[in-house]
Structures are given as C-alpha cells and as structure tokens.
Image (cartoon, helix red, strand yellow):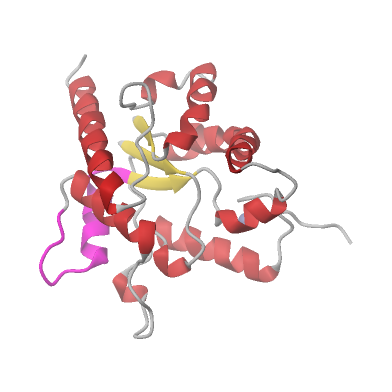
Amino acid sequence: MTEILCDGCGIPATPEHIARRLRHLELATRFRPIHVGILFVAEAPPPRLENYFYYCVSDRSENDSQRTGSSGILFDSLLQGVGIPEPAGKGDEVRLAEFQKRGLFLADLVECPREEAVNDEAHQPAQLGEIESLIQRFAPTLLKRIQFSYKPKYVALISRRLRHLIPIFQQAGLGDRLLLDRGLPLPFPHSAATRERFVASLTEVLSKAGARAKGA
Ligand SMILES: [Zn+2]
C-alpha cells in the first residue's frame, strides 16, 4: 500500500489526521481576507483544536473551555496589539471578523500541530535542531503559499525561532515584504511577561508597515 503523506506537515496521514487538517483550513478560511495586507506567520497550530487562533466562541460546545496557555495569550495580545480590544459581551467571532476586515491573517509554517511533526522528527536530538529542520523542510511550501495564495503586502513572523526564515525569504526575493523589529521576528508571547515585549515589538512593526504604505 502506498503511504499518503499529509501535505500540511508531511507525516503519514490517517483519516483522523486529514479530518483535523481540513477542520483547521475550514476555520481559518472563514476569516481569510480577500486581500492580505499583513500575513502573520507562526510555527504551527496548537495541539488542542479549541486553542486554535481561528476557533470561535460559537464553535464551542458548553463543555469546551476557553483558549488556554500561550494560545490564549497570543490571541489576546495579537488582537489587542493591532487595536482590536475585547468588546464587552462580544466574542471571538466579532474580533476575528475585525481582524479579517483590516486585511490581517495568521498562518503557520507547519499547518498541523507540531506534536505530530516533532514525533516524526523524533531522531532529531535538540529542540533547536528540530525547528531548523522544520524550516528547511517547510519553507519551500510556505514560500509557494505566500507567492501564489496569500499574496500579502507584508509578512510578520511570530517567534524568534523563525529568524532562520529571514535569509530564505531574502533569497526568494521576498525580503522587502518582511516586517522585522531590529532585524528579528516578533517574540512569541509565551507568558504574561513576554506579552509586553510582543506588543511593543508588534507596535514597532505596524508603524513600519504604515510608513511604507505612505510611500517610503
Ligand atoms: Zn498534517
């Protein structure tokens, strides 16, 4: 039997895995702008579907909890950082719709949760080695998605670990689309402490996009 590999993460695909991947695509597509002004790129979606950036309050059953951990911090700090505060009594859906209206979109380097991708790379000893090898493996697909599908004006990377993508973007002629803060990607807001740094860095990057748009 020929093994079918998932085109989101490259591991042998079970029906459950493909179903999960399609669910991600479906959730994200609802909020995908027609014209992407700024594409944010993170490493991979979180293992729990309920933590996924584009998972909405209206998708939650009563038993679902809210976004937890760093996924919750990323959701709030990214939306707040771009100027979409939490409106009283309104849920994720309203905020995500506003995010879409402003031409903002979030995608991932590896389109499936990294746990599985990491298992696939289990022979890789170091955590850092893992991300570097994931970048080598998935950068070509990401570049294709950017050039032929998202076609964003700008790209902002979320996670300093994605800095290895910078030379790859430059070689592909996409270097001037990257919005960097002092030459680096935005720091991922893992905790309340790093959240402030993330928002400051995001503000810096947004002002660069604004300045370039004014015809720099
Ligand atoms: Zn996959």
Please state the horizontal and vertical placement of residue 182, each as a whole percent of the image: 31, 22
Residue 60 position by quadrant: bottom left
Please state the horizontal and vertical placement of residue 191, each as a whole percent of the image: 32, 52
Residue 65 position by quadrant: bottom left
Q: Is residue 57 above or below residue 82?
A: below
Q: Quadrant of the N terminus?
A: bottom right
Q: Let me know if residue 103 is in the magenta part.
A: yes
Residue projecting furthest to the bottom: 62
Q: Could you tell me if residue 181 is visible in this image?
A: yes
Residue at 48% in and 67% down: 48
Q: Let me know if residue 36 is in the magenta part.
A: no
Residue at 28% in and 41% down: 198
Residue 126 is left or right of residue 90, and the answer is right
Residue 159 or residue 4, whichever sits in front: 159
Residue at 52% in and 43% down: 109
Residue projecting furthest to the left: 88
Residue 136 is left or right of residue 34, and the answer is right
Residue projecting furthest to the top: 216
Q: Is residue 180 above or below residue 41?
A: above
Query: Ligand 1 lies in which image quarter?
Result: bottom right
Q: Which residues are magenta?
A: 85-104
Q: Quadrant of the C terminus?
A: top left
Please state the horizontal and vertical placement of residue 156, each as a whole percent of the image: 36, 34
Please state the horizontal and vertical placement of residue 58, each as a whole percent of the image: 31, 75
Residue projecting furthest to the right: 1
Q: Is residue 126 above or below residue 73?
A: above
Residue 38 is left or right of residue 41, and the answer is left
Residue 100 or residue 162, whichever sits in front: 162
Q: Could you tell me if residue 6 is visible in this image?
A: no
Residue at 59% in and 43% down: 127
